[in-house]
Image (spheres, rainbow, N blue to C red):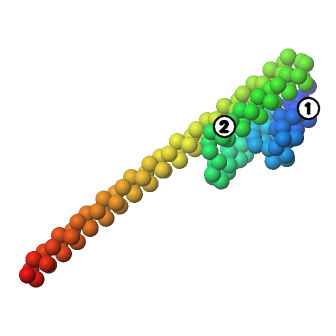
Amino acid sequence: MSQATLAHRLEVLRDEALNTAEFGEDAPGAEIFDAVINRLAAMGDTDPGLDMSLHDALSRRLAWGENPSTVIVDGDMVSKRLVAAAQRSFTDPDEATKIVATITDVACAASRHIARLAVQGASKERAQQRRELMVQRQLASALEQQRELIEQLRQQGK
């Protein structure tokens, strides 16, 4: 059976894996499901490499202010539901193994990307805090110089 057919058969489980009954069509973690389908469809044809659409979707969620841990939890929940649905629906152990391995690969890639973005964000935040501290010190120094100058002028005026 071709990987594209396997991906198409897995696509049928979308509503169950994304729990669209509770979350609607824009269910959190849909990017994980889509990446699994894309990777299964392309498996064997090419080296999957980086999934830029997955990275873009995750980056977009974080850019809109979602907490990295929330994005990871969403991906984890979708992965767990997808694994459970695949194990029930695919009786051939080879197919189930391919699907579970692909889900694991995608979930790990997503977690690595989120972690990288979180570290970059923390570095930027720390740099901003250091700049703010430097500006505060310069302001305090300028205020102290002004106090000293005012005091000198008062003493000269006496």
The image shows residue 40 at horizontal and vertical percentages of: 81, 32
Tell me the SS state at disc 2: helix
Any mark on residue 93, and which? none
Q: Quadrant of the N terminus?
A: top right
Question: The C terminus lies in which quarter of the figure?
Answer: bottom left
Q: Secondary structure at mark 1?
A: helix
Residue at point 85%, 16% (across, down): 93
Q: Which residue is mark 1?
A: 9
Neighbor class of circle 1 (other Cα within 10 Å; few <14, some 14-19, many 20+) is some
Which x, y percent locates residue 141?
25, 63
Q: Is residue 123 left or right of residue 20?
A: left
Corner quadrant of residue 100? top right
In the foreground, 157 or 15: 157
Q: Identify the amino acid type marked 1.
A: Arg
Residue sitting at 13 percent across and 78 percent down?
154
In the image, farthest residue toward the bottom? 157
Instruction: Please give the residue where the numbered disc 2 appears in the rendered image.
Output: 72
